[in-house]
Every structure is written in structure tokens, then in C-alpha cells.
Image (tube, helix red, strand yellow):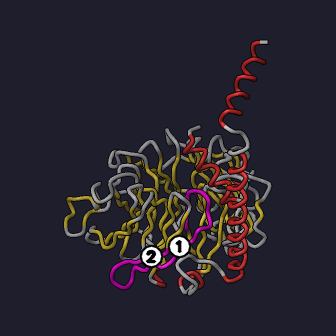
């Protein structure tokens, strides 16, 4: 391990011990890296973990269940079907993994796999579900997007004595030239599915049939955003009524006019943008980046401007989702954190968000750290002057003599 890597590790460990970060955003600790999450009602979240598991957790108690849906590799994506699809009163979750399959299971009983979706030839990187229909969408490192139809009644799966394998009803391959990292549905009608990935392009599909969406006014051309504005991997995408937001390794998040496919807004960062979340109700966009920081941008009044920074995660932000008046963030530091939107947006205590109840703790920690740094410097100075150059040379000679004995 290089000195730079050791320094980074030491800094990360120091941040993890920071008493402010341990409380900021009332973290739920998963015990493994959180690669993805989806909300299930007002008090439950489903987590995709690097430990080859998907678990449910209680948002109130901030505790994970002991039972888990187990995979043969990291669980890169999870999704929850809408509340009309249940088995024995339990909501239904899906988990996608490096093991190339997607499992379907009851949130109340993760170990009870109801069905598996099989067909991808490489890691499954993302999964989305239709908000009203039993249709599932998956994107993979094999450069394909697959469309799956679950039974109208999932109770039939629960009654089967053997594990059911479901095949896709539509496979799209050839349009994307790289891995598929993210997908999202248009939030108004859920008729269009957008996909993106390592080829830095965005494409659009009919969410029911899988057919490519034609460009408005030019039926002979498929709707797509070509590589160019984004220079490399697009890791996340979210749509609002008129805008599609993308987050990229080229250090930008971009808001695209969906009709014209032109850039409306470009949000410049100093590092890779790993997640993006538009919250149009309050005119902001939230971005998460590689070093764990979260930024809140005002985008509804002229030139976009960062109005808030949140320093809570100690590793990459992996996912951002909104639910009513709060948004949630997850990170590779193994935590899921909760943020009250109005409190963050309307915060008057400075650029960095810090609730009043934690401000005193931050000041105390800063004073303590300054004292520790002073002590460490004194100790280092004392150690460096403990032996003169001549004494150090004599000691080296003595040790050499001992080696020869």
C-alpha cells in the first residue's frame, strides 16, 4: 500500500471517529457497504450490500433485520414493487447482483425467494420497477437492458413448490456500447424508461414494450443523447416532468431538456459525481460525490448555485432518494442518513449544514483536536531531539556489532 493510500486510510478512520459525523443525519449502520437502497413505506428501507446480501431495515429504530436475501456476489441494486403487489401481507423486493441474477422476495421474509430473473451474462448493475404494473427493468455489464413481466398475482409464486425462473419478454442490446449503470422512468406517465452507463450516452424506451422511443418530429430517428457533453461514465439518472438529470465521472451533473435533448444546466464539481436527486418542489438538486460530500444546488433562479454542503459520509455517496419532506443518502461507509429538506435548504448557520444540537459538539471536538495536534507535535519534537546525530550513529554501530555476534 502506497503512502498516499495509507494517508487516505488514516484520514478516513479519523473521520469515522468524528463524534459529529457519528450523529449527523441520524445514521443507520448496515455493517457493510451500502451499494443501493429503496424505500418501502414510511418506516422500512431495503438495502443492497457489498456483503452479498440484501436486507430490510427499520427507519425508526435504525436496525437491520438478521434475515437476508443472499447472493453469490455484491448486491448492486434493489427495488420495491408498489404496495398493490404483496404476498401474505408483505411488500415485495427485488435484489440484483454480480451473480447475474435478480431475486424476488417478501420484505418480511428475505430468505424466502419467490422467483429469480435469469438471462444476463454479466453483473446486473441496476434494477427499476414500474410504479403501477408488474414490470421490472434490469441493466447489466453485458451492455443489455432486459424487460421482465411478473405474474399479476404474486401469491401464485408463493404457492409453487419449486423455485420459479422467469425469462425476459424483451431484451435490448446493441444501442449502448458499454455497461448499463442506471435507469429511471419518467415520473408523470411512467411511459418512458431512460437508460445510461459507461458509454456516456442516454437512451429512451417504451416502458411497456421495450421499443426505442422516436425523436419528436422525426419518427425515423431514435431519441438519444450522444456522448459528448458527458465525457465518461454516467453513474445515475433521475427524471422530472421536463428535465432529465445525469451524474458523471467527468465531475458534472447535467440537467437536460427532455424534448430538445440540450443541456439546460451544468453543475460543476471537483470530483466524480456518483448520485443526483432533483427536488423540484423546492427548486433544488442534490448531488453526492466520490469523497462522501453532499451538495444542495439552487437551480430555479438564474445561474445554479451551491447553497449547502453536508459532510456526513466518509466514503462515496452511493444513492440518493426522496420521500415526502425528507431525502435519504447512502454511502460506501455503510451508513444510510436522513435529511429534512426544509431544515437543510433554509439553514441559516452557514454554508456547511450543521444542526444546532450538534454545533456545540463540533466546537468541542475542534478544540480537543487542536489540543491533540499540539501534543502530537510536541511529542514528535521531543522524540526527534532525544538522540543526537552522533548518538544515533553509535547506536547503529552497536546494533551492527550485535548482528555479527
Q: Residue at left 32%, top 49%?
A: 175
Residue 370 image-quadrant placement? bottom right
Badge 1 vs badge 2, beta-carbon distance below 8 Å: yes
Residue 240 image-quadrant placement? bottom left
| Quadrant of the image containing the C terminus | top right
In this view of the protein, can residue 223 be seen by the observer? yes
Q: Mark 2 points at which residue?
A: 306
Q: Mark 1 points at which residue?
A: 309
Q: Residue at left 49%, top 49%?
A: 168
Membership of 32 in magenta stretch: no
Residue 228 image-quadrant placement? bottom left
Residue 290 drawn at (x, y percent): 51, 57
Residue 126 drawn at (x, y percent): 51, 54
Membership of 315 in magenta stretch: yes
Depth check: 14 or 191 in front?
14
- The residue stretch that appears in magenta: 296-320
Q: What element carries label 2?
A: strand
Depth check: 229 or 67 in front?
229
Depth check: 376 or 2 in front?
376
Amino acid at each position: 500500500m502506497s503512502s498516499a493510500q495509507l494517508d487516505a486510510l488514516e484520514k478516513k478512520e479519523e473521520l469515522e471517529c468524528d463524534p459529529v459525523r457519528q450523529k449527523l443525519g441520524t445514521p443507520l449502520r448496515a455493517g457493510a457497504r451500502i451499494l443501493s437502497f429503496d424505500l418501502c413505506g414510511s418506516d422500512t428501507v431495503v438495502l443492497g450490500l457489498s456483503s452479498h446480501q440484501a436486507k430490510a431495515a427499520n427507519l425508526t429504530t435504525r436496525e437491520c433485520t438478521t434475515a437476508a436475501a443472499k447472493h453469490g456476489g455484491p448486491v448492486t441494486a434493489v427495488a420495491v414493487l408498489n404496495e398493490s403487489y404483496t404476498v401474505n401481507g408483505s411488500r415485495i423486493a427485488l435484489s440484483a447482483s454480480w451473480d447475474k441474477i435478480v431475486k424476488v422476495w417478501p420484505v418480511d421474509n428475505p430468505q424466502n425467494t419467490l422467483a429469480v430473473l435469469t438471462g444476463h451474462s454479466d453483473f446486473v448493475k441496476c434494477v427499476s420497477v414500474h410504479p403501477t404494473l408488474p414490470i421490472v427493468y434490469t441493466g447489466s455489464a453485458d451492455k443489455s437492458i432486459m424487460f421482465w413481466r411478473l405474474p399479476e398475482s404474486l401469491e401464485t409464486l408463493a404457492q409453487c413448490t419449486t423455485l420459479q425462473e422467469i425469462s425476459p419478454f424483451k431484451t435490448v442490446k446493441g444501442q449502448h456500447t458499454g455497461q448499463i449503470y442506471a435507469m429511471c422512468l419518467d415520473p408523470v406517465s411512467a411511459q418512458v424508461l431512460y437508460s445510461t452507463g459507461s458509454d456516456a450516452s442516454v437512451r429512451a424506451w417504451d416502458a411497456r414494450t421495450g421499443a426505442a422511443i422516436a425523436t419528436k418530429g422525426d419518427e425515423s430517428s431514435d431519441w438519444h443523447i450522444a456522448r459528448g457533453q458527458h465525457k465518461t461514465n454516467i453513474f445515475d439518472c433521475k427524471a422530472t416532468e421536463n428535465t432529465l438529470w445525469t451524474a458523471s465521472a467527468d465531475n458534472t451533473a447535467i440537467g437536460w431538456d427532455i424534448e430538445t435533448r440540450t443541456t439546460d444546466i451544468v453543475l460543476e464539481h471537483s470530483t466524480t459525481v456518483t448520485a443526483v436527486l432533483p427536488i423540484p418542489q423546492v427548486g433544488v438538486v442534490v448531488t453526492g460525490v466520490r469523497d462522501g460530500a453532499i451538495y444542495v444546488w439552487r437551480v430555479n433562479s438564474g445561474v445554479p448555485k451551491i447553497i449547502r454542503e453536508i459532510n456526513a459520509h466518509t466514503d462515496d455517496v452511493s444513492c440518493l432518494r426522496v420521500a415526502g419532506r425528507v431525502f435519504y443518502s447512502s454511502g460506501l461507509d455503510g451508513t444510510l442518513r436522513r435529511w429534512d429538506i426544509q431544515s437543510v435548504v433554509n439553514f441559516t448557520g452557514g454554508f456547511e449544514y450543521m444542526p444546532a444540537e450538534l454545533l456545540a459538539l463540533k466546537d468541542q471536538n475542534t478544540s480537543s483536536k487542536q489540543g491533540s495536534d499540539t501534543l502530537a507535535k510536541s511529542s514528535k519534537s521531543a522524540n526527534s531531539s532525544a538522540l543526537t546525530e552522533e548518538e544515533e550513529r553509535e547506536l547503529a554501530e552497536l546494533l551492527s556489532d550485535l548482528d555479527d555476534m
